[in-house]
Amino acid sequence: MKSESRTPRGDLRTSRWLRQIGIPAASLALLSGCERVAEPKFVVSPEVAALDAQLQQAVQQHLAAQTGTPVRPKLLGAEPEAFGGEIKLNAHLQHGAEVYRQNCQQCHGPSGDGAGPAAEYLSPKPRDYRKGVFKFTSTGYGNKPRREDLVRTVTRGVTGTSMPSFARLEKKDLDAVVDYVLALTHRGELEILLAAQADSDGELTDDGVQELAQSIVDQWRAADEQIVEPVVKMPAFTPESVAKGQEIFQKRECFKCHGRDGRGGLAGGIEVGVDAWGQKTAAADLTSGMLHGGNLPVDVYRRIHAGINGTPMPAFKDILAADPDATWYLVHYVLQLSDQRRHGVQFPAAVEPKPAPPVALDNPAEEESAQ
Ligand code: HEC
Ligand code: HEC
C-alpha cells in the first residue's frame, strides 16, 4: 500500500493546483472541505446486470483483478518494462485517469460508456469505448485502431462534432490519457466477454478469463500489421482528376447514401440505418467543409478504401481494386466538394431542413431520469 500511494501523491497535488488555477468552478466540489474525494466506481454493464448475483460477483472480481478500478487502473497487456517498472506504469495510468476526469469524463462518462452528463445533448454521441470499435483508424474495416490513431484523434479532435482538439495537452498528459482510454476500452471489451462466458458456462475459471484477456490483447497488437497504405502514389490534383472522381462517385453509387450532390442525410432524408452504438446515423455531408476523419488526402483515402468501423460506410477496397487510381480520384472529388462552400458555391436549401444541433429535449421522461 505504502509504495503504491507514494508516487501518485505528487501528481495529485499538481493536478489539484492545476484545477485551482484552471477551472476553479469544476474543482470547487472536489476541494470543499474534504482532502479525499469519494472513490469513483465503474457502472455495471447491462450484460453483467442480467446475470444472477453469484455470477455477477464472479465477473466483477475477475474484471477488477485484470483491469483494476478507477483509482487503480490496470492496462491489459501493458509491459511494465516499457514504462520503467510496475510503479511507474501504475503512476502513469493513475495520472491518465486524472487527466480523463478533468477533460473527457463529462462526455465519455466515468466508465467510458459514452454516457457522461453532457452526452444527452450531443449528436453524434461521445464514443462508448467499451465496444472496442473506433471510427477514425488507419487500419482496415473491422480492425482495431493503432495507438497512434487514438493519439491523432485526441490531438486533432473530430471536426464537425463536439469532440474537441486536445492539442494543448502536454505529451505526458496526452500519452497518459490515451493509455487510460485504452484501459477503459479493454475493460469494457473484457466485461462483455466475461458476461457471455459466465452466462454460457455458468462459471468462470482463471484459465478461461486469462484466455479471453489475451484474445483482446492479441487483437489490439495485430492492428500494427493492418495499416492501410495507399496502393499507388496520389496522382496530380487537376480538374480532370476531380471530374473522374465525380464520375466514379455516380458509377459506384456513393450517391445512394451521400446524395447526388454529396450532402448526405441533409440533402433528402436518405436513411442509412443505425451505427454499432445503436444511434440513428446519416451519411456524411461531404460539402460541409468539416470532414470528421481529417482533411488530408490520406485521411479521405482511408475512409473510402477501408470504410468506417461501426457505421454503414462500406470499404471500397475490393470494388475499386481493378483501378488503383480510382480511390485517389474519389479523394480529389471529395476534397473539391468539401471546399466548395468556402469558394462561394451555393447549395439549394435542404429538402428536409433539420433543426440545428444541440438536439431538442423532446422526451421529458428521459430528462427526468438523467437528473
Ligand atoms: C464535449 C464532449 C467531448 C469531450 C469533452 C471529449 N470527447 Fe471524445 N468524443 C466526443 C464525441 C461526440 C465523439 C464521437 C465523434 C464521432 O462519432 O464522429 C468522440 C470520440 C472520441 C474517440 C473515438 C474516435 C474514433 O476513432 O472513433 C476518442 C478516442 C475520444 N473521443 C477520446 C477523448 C478523450 C481522450 C477526451 C479527453 C481528453 C475526450 N474524448 C473528450 C465528445 C467528446
Ligand atoms: C451505405 C451507405 C454509404 C455508401 C454507399 C457510401 N457511404 Fe460514405 N459514408 C456513409 C456514412 C454513414 C458515413 C458517416 C460515418 C460516420 O458516422 O462518421 C460516410 C462517410 C464518408 C466519408 C467520411 C467523411 C468524413 O467526415 O470524414 C467519406 C470520405 C465518404 N463517406 C465517401 C464515400 C464515397 C466516395 C463513397 C462511394 C465510393 C461512399 N462514401 C459510399 C455511408 C455511405
Image (cartoon, rainbow, N blue to C red):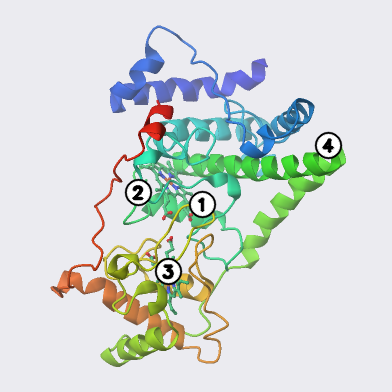
Task: Give whichever of 263, 40 is nearer the camera.
Answer: 263
Q: Position of residue 89 (x, y in %)?
A: 62, 35
Residue 79 numbered tag: none
Viewer-nearest of labels 1 and 4? 1
Q: Are marks 3 and 1 in contact (CB under 8 Å)?
A: no
Corner quadrant of residue 111: top right
The residue beneath circle 1 is: 278
Q: Disc 4 residue type?
A: Leu
**Mark 3: amino acid:** Asp
Cβ–Cβ under 8 Å for marks 2 and 3? no
Position of residue 182 measured from the top left corner of the image (x, y, whole percent): 58, 45
Circle nearer the N terminus (3, 1): 1
Q: CA distance from mark 3 to mark 1?
A: 25 Å
Please name the residue that numbered disc 2 is placed on: 165
Q: Which residue is mark 3?
A: 299
Q: Is mark 1 within 8 Å of ligand 1?
A: no
Q: Kindly identify the amino acid type of the residue bearing the numbered disc 1.
A: Gly
Do labels 1 and 4 touch, CB within 8 Å?
no
Q: Earlier in the sequence, mark 3 or mark 4?
A: 4
Q: Which residue is mark 4?
A: 204
130 vs 222, left or right, is left
Which callout, 1 or 2, points at the residue further toward the start of the chain? 2
Q: Is residue 325 above or below residue 203?
A: below
Q: Is residue 23 above or below residue 144?
A: above
